[in-house]
Amino acid sequence: LCSLVARNQFLNHLNTNIKFVFSSGKTDYGRNVIARQIEEDISHGSSFGEINIISNGNISVVEAHNINSVEYPDRCPESTILVIYRDGKKVTQANLHNSATL
């Protein structure tokens, strides 16, 4: 239940039309993009380990170490950096940078 509450708080912090920019250069729009990704990660047993956050003004940098399940050991890269841009209290853009996979 705690993770469901945290997930909903995170999603509610995002503008409904948030812009996502991925490592590949692909862009996508909408809160549903990350909600779907979170659901897929949960269903594959992926989670975050250590998380470091640095914020200044309307920009935050989130560094997360990914943990994969035994069944899907290569699902997520070792780490992910999320650069978050806010306009007021809502996140309007998030740039996702994954570490290289070996």
Image (spheres, rainbow, N blue to C red):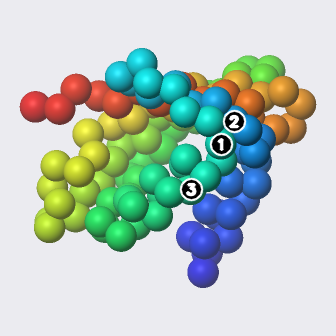
State the residue at coordinates (89%, 31%): 88
Q: Is residue 13 left or right of residue 74?
A: right
Query: Around disc 3, counting alpha carbons within 10 Å, would you say few (fewer than 14), some (14 to 19), or many (20 or more)?
Result: some
Residue furthest left in the image = 102
State the residue at coordinates (29%, 66%): 44
Could you say which quadrant of the image residue 78 lies in? top left
Say which element carries label 2: strand
Pointer 2 or 3: first along the chain: 2
Residue 54 sits above or below residue 13 on the image: above
State the residue at coordinates (33%, 48%): 66
Q: Quadrant of the C terminus?
A: top left
Pointer 3 or 1: first along the chain: 1
Q: Tell me, for residue 30, which label it has, or none.
A: 1
Can residue 55 be seen here? The reply is: no
Q: Which residue is mark 2?
A: 18
Q: Which residue is mark 3?
A: 35
Residue 70 sits above or below residue 54 on the image: below
Say which element carries label 1: loop
Instruction: Tell me the amino acid under the disc marked 2.
Output: Ile
Q: Is residue 17 left or right of residue 94?
A: right
Residue 25 horizontal/vertical position (percent): 42, 18
Q: Is residue 48 left or right of residue 67?
A: right
Residue 30 sits above or below residue 82 on the image: below
Q: Tell me, for residue 77, which label it has, or none.
A: none
Instruction: Tell me the amino acid under the disc marked 1.
Output: Gly
Instruction: Tell me the amino acid under the disc marked 3.
Output: Ala
Query: Around disc 1, counting alpha carbons within 10 Å, would you say few (fewer than 14), some (14 to 19), or many (20 or more)?
Result: some
For the residues marked 2 and 3, what is the alpha-carbon distance in whole angstroms?
A: 12 Å
For the residues marked 1 and 2, what is the alpha-carbon distance in whole angstroms?
A: 5 Å
Could you say which quadrant of the image residue 59 lies in? top right
Residue 20 horizontal/vertical position (percent): 57, 31
